[in-house]
Amino acid sequence: MGENLPLAVEIEINSDCNLSCAYCPNSKSERIEKGHMPLETFKKIMLQLQQYNYAGRISYHFYNEPTLSPNLNLFVRMTKEHLPKAKTILYSNGTNLDKNKIDALYADGLDRFVITEHHQAKLHNLDFISDDKSIYTTNRFKFSTFKQIPMTNRAGAVKAGARITEPLNTPCFIPRCVLVITLKGNVVACYEDYFQHHVMGNIHEQDIMSIWNSEKYVHFRNELKLGNRHKFEACKNCNNQLIIV
């Protein structure tokens, strides 16, 4: 029996990042896919989700800094045009943002900014937000520092966080909650899977719902629900213990 689409769809609209943090695989490894997502790929994602009146979260990242994409504003507008009930959230390091860019993204339909200040860059460029709470309300912004975010080992790709020597036997529900789509339209089973060990399908070859309800994807989710992380390459060394995302 099929399942509803996940709570969140994360779309890798570009591959580059302007930081190189030790707790991110980008500091140590090459991206599997490089460049910018073609307009036709993004539009295909929107049209497929539109069929199901998708109303979950849409964000624009997979180990990238989305504000470096020349099409970010366009993609936000397209999201609101095709998925008016969806909640659009921008996860960013904030270094490429200023008042004009923030106001433009709001005008294009962005619902919320989630900004993390990393040790490499202090965000003095965003001081104006705390000066005008009447416009830049806290429910539209979430700020944190890198010290406040969960430090996982990114499925064993980095050493940040508590290292484990044996596979966790705890259930993982991330693949039931989040679907990740890469630059080329590959659907990756988990946002921790930097090396794309578990590609479940491609949106240019199959509809998103068909991929989501495929035997391969359902099996993956069910095994992780039982805590069988040792069966999968991206999961056997992962120390992410989030139960709900």
Image: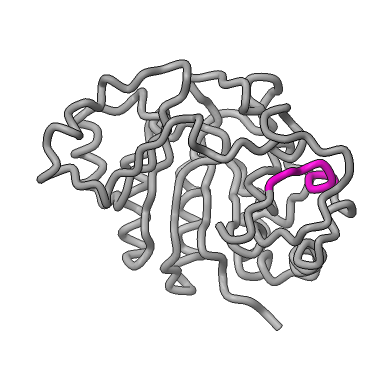
Q: Which residues are magenta?
A: 233-240
Q: Where is residue 241 shown, x and y percent of the image?
A: 68, 51
Does 236 appear in magenta? yes
Q: Is residue 186 left or right of residue 145?
A: right
- Whether 233 is drawn above or below 189: the answer is above
Q: Where is residue 136 shown, x and y percent of the image?
A: 18, 42
Q: Is residue 87 left or right of residue 7?
A: left
- Name the residue located 27 percent from the left edge and 52 percent from the top edge: 139
- Whether 85 is drawn above or below 2: the answer is above
Report which quarter residue 101 is drawn in: top left
Q: Is residue 125 left or right of residue 132?
A: right
- Name the residue located 34 percent from the left edge and 24 percent from the top edge: 96
Q: Is the N terminus in the top left, top right, bottom left or bottom right quadrant?
A: bottom right
State how the image is colored: one colour
Does 209 appear in magenta? no
- The overriding secondary structure of the stretch rendered in magenta is loop
- Name the residue located 57 percent from the left edge and 40 percent from the top edge: 150
- Name the residue located 75 percent from the left edge and 66 percent from the top edge: 225
Q: Where is residue 99 shown, x and y percent of the image?
A: 19, 30
Q: Is the C terminus in the top left, top right, bottom left or bottom right quadrant?
A: bottom right
